[in-house]
Amino acid sequence: MIITQITRAALYLRSSKDRSDVSIDAQRRQLQQLATDRGFVITEEFSDVVESGKDELRAGFQRLLGAVRNKRRGWDTLLILDTSRLARRRHISLVFEEVEARKHGVRVVYKSLPDSDPITEMLLKSILQAMDEWHSLTSKQKGLAGMAENVRQGWRAGGRAPMGYELQHVETGAIREGAPVKKSKLIKGDAAATVQAYLKLRAEDCNRTKACTLSGLKSSSSTLVGVEWNALTYAGHTAWNVRYEHGAGGYANSVKRRPRAEWVVQRDTHEPLITNEEAESLLARLEAFDRGHHAHADYILTGLLKSTAGENWRGSDGGAGGYYRLGKGKRIKASIVEAAIMGEVQRALRTPAFVQGLTDAARKQFDDRKNDDAIPRMKKECAELDRRIRRLTEMLADTSRPEPLLRQVEEYEVQRADFARQIHQRMEEAHEAAKVKALAAPQVGKLLATMAEEFERIDREGLRDLLKGLVEQVVLDDTAQTFQITYRLDAATGLGMASPRGFEPLYSP
C-alpha cells in the first residue's frame, strides 16, 4: 500500500481600494483550484480587505506572521495569488520570505509563478516584486497629482470639513461609471461664528482656556490645536500637502507637519472667518512652539555625552544650532562638539586597529563553539519518526477504525516537522558562523569605510541611531576642553580604543 504524505497549506488574500483589483472571492477560487491541482489541503486562511500593500501593519498580515512563527501551526506551505498580494514594497516581501518564512520552514507558492528551477524562480520573483513597487509608486504619484490639481482648481482634496465649515458637493458635469462626478467646497456651518470668535481671540494672544470661555467654544485641547493649525483654511484658502504621510520615517516621525515651503495653497477658494494677518499670527506661534518642543530630536549625542562625573549633557535652545547644557551653568555649542566627535568617529572607522579589533571581536564569538552535536541526534529522531509513521500507515489497511491511527500519524508528522525546522535553523546558524569565522580584516575594512561615508548622507535621526550602535559613551572634560570616546568594541575586545581628543573653541562667545 502506497501512502502519499499530505501537504497542508494556508491561503493569504488581500484586496485594495483599487476598483480594478482582484476580489477576495476571486483570489480564493483561484488558489483553491491551485491547491487541488497540486494536491495541497487548505487548513487555514488569512485575509486583508481593502488594505494597501504598502502597509505591513495589516491585521491579516500580522496574524499570518504570528502563525508563521508558531511551530505548531500545522501547515508548511503558503499559497498567494501573486507577489503584489503579499506586498507592494519589495523590502516587506523580502523580509517576509527570506527571514520569516525561510527561518520557520514555510514555503511560499505564487499562482502567477510557473514551476521552474530555483534560479529562474528567484529572477522572475525579483522582476515581479520590482514591478509591484513601481506600480504602487506610480499610482501614488498619479493620485497625489490629481489631488493637487483639484486644489489648484479650488476644490477640496478630500477629508472632512474643518470645525465651523460644512462641505458643499457640486456636480462637475462629468460622468464616471454611470454616476455624476461630484467635488466639494467649503461653506460656513452652524458653528462658524463661535470658531471665528475663538480664532480672533487666539490671534490677539489670548490664552487658549480664556479664549474658549469668551467664545463659548467647547472642545479638547488637542482638537483646538488642530483648529489653529488650519488657520489658512479659516482665512479662506485651501491648503494641501501640510502633513507628513503616516510612517514616512526619519524627521517625519518626530513632527507631523511639513515645512511651509512644501504646502500647496490655493488662495480665496471659500468665505473666510479670519484675516490673513490673523492666520499668520496663529501659525507663527504654533511653529515657534513646535521648534522648541521637538528640538531634542536634533541632538545626536543625547544619552551619549557625559561629564567626567558621569552627568548627562542635555540639548536645549533650538536643536542643531543650539547648545548642550550641564546643569544650570555650563553650555557647549552643539555644532562644534558634534562636528569634532563625528569627525573622530569617522577617522576611527578607517584605522587599521579599529578594523582588526572588530574583525577579532566578531570571530571570537564563534571561536569557542564546538560542533553542534544536536543535529545528528535530531536527524536520528526524524528517522525514527519516519519509521513509526510507515508502520502506522501499514496498519491502516487492516483496521476498520482508522481514526486513532490517523491522529497518531498526525502527531508524529508535527513532531517530525518541528525537528526538520530545528535542523534547518541550526544548519543555517552553523553556515553563518562559518562565514563569520572566515572574515578577513580587508572585508571588514570596506564595510566600515562604507559606514564612515554614510555619516555624510543620512539625516540627523539616522546619525543618532548609527552612533548609538557604535559608541558606548563620550566623556567631555570641560576643564581640559577634551573628549574621550568609548566604543562598544572596547568592551568586546579589551583593546582600549578610546583616546582623548581636543577641540576649539569649547564654549559659546
Image: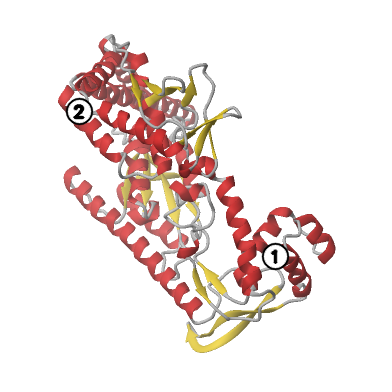
Tell me where residue 341 appears, x and y as whole percent: 36, 30
Label 1 element class: helix
Q: Foreground: 77 or 91?
A: 91
* Residue 161 seen anywhere in this rendered image of the structure: no
Residue type (three-letter) at the residue carrying disc 2: Gly
Q: Residue furthest bottom?
A: 173
Determine whether 325 is above or below 221 in the image: above
Determine whether 437 is above or below 272 in the image: above
Tell me where residue 279 appears, x and y as whole percent: 63, 68
Q: Is residue 382 left or right of residue 29?
A: left
Q: Foreground: 269 or 117?
A: 269
Which residue is denoted by mark 1 in the rendering? 203
Query: Looking at the rendering, which quadrant does residue 212 occupy?
Result: bottom right
Tell me where residue 392 appears, x and y as whole percent: 38, 24
Q: Is residue 104 left or right of residue 291?
A: left
Residue lying at 50% horizontally and 47% vertically, measured from the top left:
253
Residue lying at 50% horizontally and 63% vertically, measured from the top left:
260
Which residue is denoted by mark 2 in the rendering? 445
Label 2 element class: helix
Determine whether 65 is above or below 21 in the image: above
Residue lying at 49% horizontally and 88% vertically, measured from the top left:
174
Q: How many labels does the image show?
A: 2
Between circles 1 and 2, the one closer to the viewer is 1
Colouring of the image: secondary structure
